[in-house]
Image: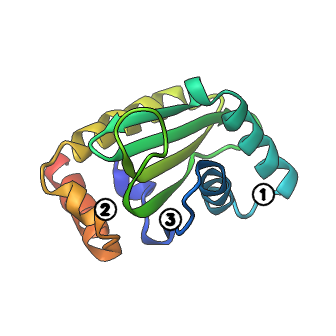
Amino acid sequence: MQLSNFIRIDRLIDVNYQDHLSTLELLIKSAIPHLSSDIQFHAFEEIRSRSDSKEINLGSGFAMSHLRLEEIQNTYLSVGLLGSKTDYLKGDPVHTVFCILIPQDKSREYLSFMTNLSRFLMIPEIEKHFLARNHSEIINAIAQFDQSRS
């Protein structure tokens, strides 16, 4: 499972909001722009209402919002680049938020993605690319990571 299958340059979003809910709404709409506003709102409400179990501060400036949706057949993702460390969730300040929407029946794919994402985010120089909002460097680092794992 390659990270580059999910994290593409068009999924890197420079976020200029300071508040959590506006950021979450933007990331959901960016992850599933082709789906109806009703489904986007449903996803937003599900994550917002169960924030303690659907949003995780990963540490080192990274956070994740995730949800399983019956209405989708593929995994969708957007990455919010906040540009500076912000008190987004409880815990350490955050500069990057991964928003992941997963079909109900793709547990293996999700676990494989999370394993690879965790390994990728542990690379020491990775944080600086995300913090700087350097889209091309992020994509290049993902490609190098994927290549090293194949």
Residue 132, how many percent across, how many down?
A: 29, 70
* Horizontal arrangement in the rendering, residue 59 relative to residue 48 (left or right): left
User: Which residue is the site of mark 2?
Assistant: 130
| Sequence-wise first label, 1 or 2 | 1
User: Which residue is the site of mark 1?
Assistant: 35
Which amino acid type corresponds to the residue marked 3 in the rendered image?
Arg
Residue 84, how many percent across, how many down?
A: 36, 62
The relative height of residue 28 versus residue 17 in the rendered view (above or below) is above
State the CA–CA distance, disc 3 to disc 2.
13 Å
Q: How many residues crowd around disc 3 within 10 Å: few (fewer than 14), some, or many (20 or more)?
A: some
Residue 117, how many percent across, how many down?
A: 32, 42
Q: Which mark is residue 86?
A: none
State the CA–CA distance, disc 1 to disc 2.
27 Å
In front here: 13 or 75?
13
Q: Identify the image quadrant of the N terminus.
A: top left
Q: Label 1's element? A: loop
Q: Label 3's element? A: helix
